[in-house]
Every structure is written in structure tokens, then in C-alpha cells.
Amino acid sequence: MRLSLRQWTVVAVIVLLFVLVVPIAWTGIESWNTTDDYRIPYGLSEDYWQYQRFVGATANGSRKKILAIGDSVIWGEYVTPDETLSQHLNQLAGRERFANGGANGTHPLALEGLVRYYARDVRDASVLLHCNLLWMSSPERDLSSTKELSFNHPRLVPQLYPRIPCYRATINERLGIVVDRGSTFRSWVHHLRIAYFDSQSIPDWTLEHPLENPLGQVTLKLPGPKNLPHSEPVAWTARPMKPQDIPWVPLDKSLQWQAFQRTVRLLYSRGNRLYVVINPFNEHMLAPASEKRYRLLKGDAESWLQAEDVPYDAPPVLPSAEYADASHPLSAGYARLARRLLEQESFQDWLVEE
């Protein structure tokens, strides 16, 4: 069958309307559990379309809240949804004022991409931004190592500039990711794959399930967060962990720190109000020389925040029994951090202005 120019125009219009309208309409027909202690389910950690939907509704919806943004420390790796930092803050404040915008595995280079491309609707909002110096603890975590490495959220990191030495994706893969970032439709398709097809494309899924109807998979109901910790909530002292001589990467040479700085400036450029919390690293597990290097690094981070006039808090180290590992608190640690924050004059002033 040959189509005329007019018929091709009609086809193009129909396809264009589908691409533009369906992702928008989908938000009205797909249900998801929006409880006060909601956090992105672990299985949807790479579903950036859903993250965009959640933070946009949280920052601008009728129940607008202060959005806590950060990695798995904010998300709550070793605690239930109602034991995270945001929920402890809500409990102490006596009302639901904070929302958990943490995303598991988002090191600063990934968090920058998440904010830049999938949190565009977070504007003129109040943001509690988490800074985890763990990501500067070694060239491997900093992603400045020249050895090829696999790492979390490669689709979020800079694809062309600045260069990440350990990231070896092909130019075709990089350009495909760049295109995806600018296409709501492609992000929505990626959402369908993760939410309903085990992160597979529909053709690949049908090969493994030849007798099943793919449409039957699309239930229009997203899984809610499980009311369980993702990892066993045991103190680090009960694990086979010994004091470590962590090298640390100086901030002036750190790719992750540069990404954190860009994220701060990006959020400010969108009219947001920021308060930064520097995560208290588990210094109990550091060898003396490493502890000394860490404190110098933390001091440099504080100096930059002061120079940029960014309100912040740098809580002291928690009791050893309140850490699950190098940087994740247990529930008691989150409770202590929440009390500490609400006692800080700078945080109180920031909340009053909110």
C-alpha cells in the first residue's frame, strides 16, 4: 500500500499526538500509593519517569512539602519507610512537612543528572540536600579511576562532558541516553519496562513468556514501597568489618564533589531554597591517619558551603551502635540526626522562612 502525502501527514499527526499526549494522560490513569512515608520502591530505583512524577507532585502539589534529596542514606537502606530521616523529622515536627526524595545508589554524579533532567519541576521549593562524603573516599567511588568500572545509574552521569575516566560506554550508547533525557515519551517507555516487564523490552519479554499476553502485564497499578528495610538492620560492629585506612580524594580533584557543587548551583538557579546536611561518616571504623584526612576533607566541604552562603549542618559522629555501615544510620541514628537538625538555629531560621 502506498500512502499519499496527505495520508502520511495524517499518520504523522496521529503519531505525534500519541507521543505527546499518552505520557501526560498516563499520570491520570496509573495509580500509585502516595502515603505520607512514601519512598520510591527499590525496584523502581532506575525509573526516572516515576521519580519525576513523584518529586513534581511533592514540590508543587496541593500537599507541598520540603523535599529531602540524596542517596540511600536519605532513602533509608537499613530502615522501614517510617524510620527514615524525613519521617523522624515529621514525627518531631508533629506534622507531615518533609517528603523522602531519596533515590537508592545516587552518588553525586548521578544525583546531578537526576536533578538536572528529571527534577525540572522542583522550582521555587524548599530542598533538604544531603551530602555524603563517602563518594570521595577512593578513586573508585569518586569515578576518577582510569580503570573501567561498573557503577550505579550510568544513564544519569554526564555522557559527553565532563569526562568520567572509568565510564567506557560507546558513542552510540551515550547519544541514545542524551536523546532519552530530552524525550518524555522515551522516559515513559522506560517506565513501562521497569514497572511491568522486569526492565526488559516488550520483544525480549515475550520471548521469555511466549504464552502470556503483554497487555495483561500492564495493570495500571504500581507497586508500593515495602514496609521493610532493604538490608538487615544490624549494627556494623556485628558485621565482619574492621577499621579501614581509607585514602580519600581531595575535593579539588574529586569528580563527585564537582558534581555536588553543580547540583547546589542548579537548584539555586531554579529558585529553590536549600539546606545542606553533611552526612556524619562512621569515624569509628577509620584508622587514625584516615580519620585525620577525613576531618580535613569535611572541613574543606564546610568552607565551600560557607563561602557560597549555603545554610548547612555538619552533625558530629553518631554513637557506634547507631551505624549499619560506613555511612548509613539505623533508626536510632536517624532519630538523633532529626533531633539535632531541629535544634540548630540555622535550620530553625530556614524553616521559619519556608
Image (spheres, rainbow, N blue to C red):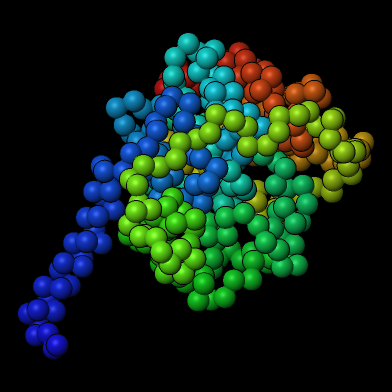
Q: Dividing the image into 4 quarters, which one contains the N terminus?
A: bottom left
Q: Is residue 88 left or right of residue 55?
A: right
Residue 162 seen from this side: yes
Q: Dividing the image into 4 quarters, which one contains the C terminus?
A: top left
Q: Which one is nearer the viewer's eye here, 193 or 13?
A: 193
How many labels were placed on the picture? Answer: 0
Q: What percent of the width, then of the height, locates residue 60?
A: 33, 34
Q: What percent of the width, then of the height, locates residue 314?
A: 68, 28
Taking the spot 25% from the left edge, 55% from the top edge, the residue there is: 22
Q: Find the residue positioned furthest to the right.
A: 288
Q: Which one is nearer the viewer's eye here, 189 or 208?
A: 208
Q: Is residue 317 above or below residue 165?
A: above
Q: What percent of the width, then of the height, locates residue 116?
A: 45, 51
Taking the spot 54% from the left edge, 12% from the top edge, the residue there is: 92
Taking the spot 49% from the left edge, 55% from the top edge, the residue there is: 198
Q: Is residue 29 above or below residue 153?
A: above
